[in-house]
Amino acid sequence: MDVPEGFRRTATRDVELGGRAIRRGDKVVVYHASANRDGAVFPDPDRFDATRSPNDHVSFGYGPHFCLGAQLARLQLRSALRCLVERLPGLRLVPGRPPRRLVSNFQNGLKSLWVQWG
């Protein structure tokens, strides 16, 4: 499943962020991959840790723009992973075949993920 890579917003007032001026009316894009790897927020930000807590990621947006389907998406992911582990206990990544990422400014996903079972 492809996931939106970022979300676009319009600045409602003049601000300075990271030493850059953003003027009212400017269009800005928040890229999840960058925001979710902020070393000031996440210790060891490039390491996947499904048990990380607290986990203040912005993958589902933030504040009034928070995704209404976030809880459903989390439930579906837990269910899918549980089914995979229970029904295909020998499932694992194929050594030497790294995942191929989808290259896009708009979506985040994989082109291929090689697995073997048995």
Image (tube, rainbow, N blue to C red):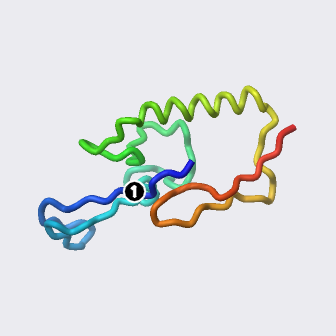
Horizontally, residue 68 falls left or right of residue 1, namely: left
Q: Quadrant of residue 71?
A: top left
Amino acid under disc 1: Ala
- Quick check: can you spot residue 94? yes
Q: Which residue is mark 1?
A: 35
| Element carrying mark 1 | helix
Horizontally, residue 86 falls left or right of residue 58, namely: right
Looking at the picture, does residue 69 appear above or below residue 109? above
- Residue at the bottom extreme, as displayed: 20
Residues packed near mark 1 inside 10 Å, few (<14), some (14 to 19) or many (20 plus): some
- The percent position of residue 38, horizontal first and vertical second, equals 41, 57
- The percent position of residue 89, horizontal first and vertical second, equals 79, 31
Horizontally, residue 29 falls left or right of residue 92, namely: left
Determine the residue positioned at 38% across, 55% down.
40
Q: Quadrant of residue 109?
A: bottom right
Determine the residue positioned at 43% across, 50% down.
42
- Residue at the top extreme, as displayed: 86
Determine the residue positioned at 70% across, 33% down.
84
Determine the residue positioned at 62% across, 61% down.
101
